[in-house]
Image (cartoon, grey):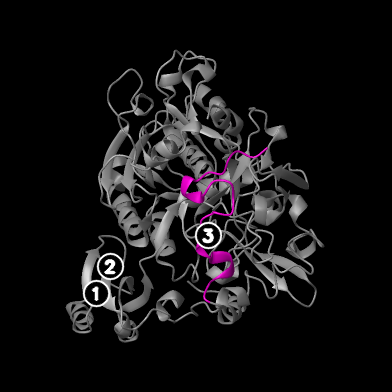
Amino acid sequence: MKLPATLLLTFAAAGFALAGEKVSPDLKHVDPGTTVTAVIQFTSTPDNATLKAIGLKGGQAKKSFKKFQGGVFTVPASAVAEIAALPQVKYISIDRVVRPRLDITTATAGADIARQYGWTGRGVAVAVLDSGIDAGLRDLKAAGSEESRVVYSENFIGGGDGDLYGHGTHVAGIVGGNGTSSAGTGRVFRGIAPEVNIVSLRVLDENGVGSDSAVIAAMDRAVELKDRYNIRVLNLSLGRPILESFASDPLCQAVEMAWNAGIVVVVAAGNNGRDNSAGNQGYATITSPGNDPYTITVGAMKAKGTPDRNDDEIASYSSKGPTIADHFVKPDLLAPGNNVTSLRAVNSTLDTAYPDNRVLPGSYGAASGPAVYYSMSGTSMAAPAVAGAAALMLQKDPNLTPDQVKARLMKTAGKAFPTYSTATDPVTGQTYTSQYDIFAVGAGYLDIYAALNCPDLPMGRAVSPTAVFDAATGSVVILANSVAWGESVAWGESVAWGESVVWGSSVFGSALSVAWGESVAWGESVAWGESVAWGESVTQGFHSIWSTSVAWGENVAMAEKVFGMKPEK
């Protein structure tokens, strides 16, 4: 895809791979005496001569894909440059590590109203790429039946089946739990699309750890199975640091493969919004593949324990844009993600490590017995709310394209926010201030009922726009990307789809410049100029913001391996 020339300059300054470069930055620094596992992307199906040449240079194939144009190889680090020089090789990167990222949620987002009109997700399947799913739970069966709505399961990471970590089951419950285990009580923990079918693609092990290659293989399978199970939505409540442009990142290229096959891809934004280690106030902390402009990238709101949206606030840990390297406006929208009650995977790693998160039956008026539900917080919990919403929309109108689903969700998202809010970490007592700008809230707050009632059919791609910083004026301009992409873009085609309509009139000043002036993100702050978003801190070994402890949220009350901070006050 064609990139704006202004972005190429920032890539060079920040140490990212420029257009045409074929080796990822992290792979360039590997000890040449070692052997690495790498994802090799090809420009076309590799011929025998290319595969033979890789073999002669010491490369050995480990995994191939049916739909994704690439494979996984072990290669001597000393031979990477020679392999990259082969004509059919598009890009080589390390097989990197990825990690994971109701009753109130359902009511707040408007799914209860949708259900009253018969929109429940019936006939649509959502693929959940996560730690697996406990398919035997009552809430994941068809109503009044013993037949599970988890219609297909496959393990891409090894180490046993089911959900040994406990994250995927919780995510699946948000997408499509039907609340059977809490029926007749004071609180019914029902998911967004309670009759949807679920495809479980396990890519995270018992510790919540996976790899690029496992996630790519699962997306490859989702595309292969799309027509068999009517897979229309794919949920990725996981991520990893960004080390190159989306145009080369193998995870981004895989999600675009699924998007172009007609599957809506929903991704968690990440939980690094509190991270100020680079002096950037938590900006530029979106993780991959949430940095891809086609995906629906979701940040987290706090429902504050009530179905009333008017008192809701953004979760301070929700990652903010712009994206590193490409500077796309992310997240695309927000959904409830704090202190979300969903399904418990009994004796999983999370369940055992954090027993206080179990929701006891007596707390919602059920008879005594083992806990069926569990509480977690994070953008991992917000993403499946949007995935469930997309399933409802596609049940109502099966002909919608992924771009039309994204555009409708963004246009109809709630846009009434305060200017600022504060949150307090319940363990450390530290207070965080959040500003409600376009890089924090995107197009707004998920409103399912409004999205279901939107009749518009925008044409063109619903790609996330690009933010361009003008150092001379100190202003930030939002580009709709129609020039950069060389194709029609949904935004700006008419008054009904103008940028201010989709993102809210309060975020733009004249000429689509961002309107907040001397905010925490701009002016003399380090979010621009020599910041992690544009420059030097990324160059120096990708330390600073992407150190291991910061990238996975160990600077907050609960490690991101739980995907969940303790609920904010």
Residue 106 position, x and y percent, is 54, 30
Asked if disc 2 and disc 1 are in contact, CB closer than 8 Å, the reply is: yes
The residue that mark 3 highlights is 549
Q: Where is residue 227 in the image (x, y as percent from the top left)?
A: 29, 45
Above or below for 361 versus 568: above
Residue under label 1, please give it.
46
User: In the image, which is nearer the foreground, mark 3 or mark 2?
Assistant: 3
Q: Quadrant of the C terminus?
A: top right
The answer to which of marks 3 and 2 sits earlier in the sequence is 2
Q: How crowded is mark 3: few (under 14 residues within 10 Å), some or many (20 or more)?
A: few
Q: Is mark 1 on a helix, strand or loop?
A: loop
Residue 377 position, x and y percent, is: 54, 40
The range drawn in magenta is 541-569
* Residue 228 in view, yes or no: no
Q: Which residue is drawn at 75% across and 51% down?
A: 505
List the residue tagged with mark 2.
Answer: 71
Q: Residue 331 shows which numbered tag?
A: none
Q: Between marks 2 and 1, how big is the CA–CA gap?
A: 10 Å
